[in-house]
Structure formats: C-alpha cells, structure tokens
Amino acid sequence: MALLTRDQILSAEDNKTETVPVPEWGGEVIVAAMSGFARDRLEASIVGSQGGSNMVNVRAKFVAASLVDEKGELIFSDSDIQKLGKKSAAALSRVFAVSQRLNHVTDDDVEELAKNS
C-alpha cells in the first residue's frame, strides 16, 4: 500500500452516504458520515461543558448531524433537534442505526459518552 501525501489525504472523497427509506415520513433521506469535527462537536453536545451527560434526544442529535441534501449539506440545524425528537421513534431509530454504522459509533460508544460525562 502506498504512503499518502498531505494533498492526497485532504482531497480524498471519504464521506460515505446511504439513502434510507423512511415510510413514516413518506420518502427517503440521505445519511452521511460525519467529518471528524462534526463528530467531536456532536459528542461535546452530549457530554456538555459542565461535565454532565445530556443523553436527552441523542437519536435526534445524531440524525440532525448526519442527514444531508443532494449536495451533501446538512438539512437540520441545532435549533431543529427538539422538533426532530418528537418524530416517530421507529423512524428516528432506523436513521440513527444507519448513522451509527456509517460513523463507526457502537452502542458501547454511546453508553461510554453517557458514563464518562
């Protein structure tokens, strides 16, 4: 395997996406792998600055951080998380599961965030 250069790493298209049917919402969504920065930001929002865990709406947080449009732009902002959390638990869980897989986040990782915060 070849040793990569800085330019090769920075220009690599490494953010995978997957289209997921969500019949509860009447269509499909595109789930994207998060950047390292986005994942760190999400984890920081769960852990919180005061050291306490904020696992409330964790599925909605993951979904908001990984749903994109056709151009790869996030379709939700932080201000949408509360509303998103009120959507079908089945739909959120389905999309959350794909986000977990694409972002290599295990159930143990989520539990660890809750424990270490």
Image (cartoon, rainbow, N blue to C red):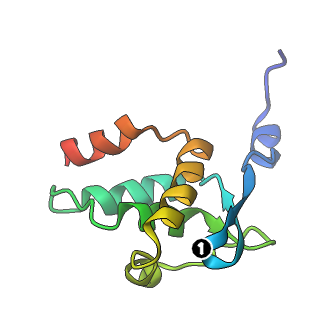
For residue 14, side relative to residue 107 (left or right): right
Q: Residue at x 54, y 39 (%)?
A: 104
- Seen from the viewer's position, the closer of residues 64 and 93 is 93
Within 10 Å of the Cα at label 1, are there few (<14), some (14-19), or many (20+) other Cα atoms?
A: few
Question: In which image quadrant can residue 48 be found?
Answer: bottom left
Q: Please state the horizontal and vertical placement of residue 97, each as a whole percent of the image.
A: 53, 50
| Residue designated by label 1 | 24
Q: Residue at x 79, y 32 (%)?
A: 5
Q: Amino acid at mark 1?
A: Glu
Q: How many marks do you count on the picture?
A: 1
Using the image, determine if residue 83 lies above or below residue 44. below
Q: Please state the horizontal and vertical placement of residue 54, each as a whole percent of the image.
A: 24, 62
For residue 72, side relative to residue 74 (left or right): right
Q: Please state the horizontal and vertical placement of residue 34, each as a whole percent of the image.
A: 59, 54
Q: Please state the horizontal and vertical placement of residue 23, each as a whole percent of the image.
A: 66, 70
Q: Residue at x 70, y 72 (%)?
A: 73
- Seen from the viewer's position, the closer of residues 68 and 85 is 85
- The quadrant of the image that shows the N terminus is top right
- Seen from the viewer's position, the closer of residues 83 and 116 is 83
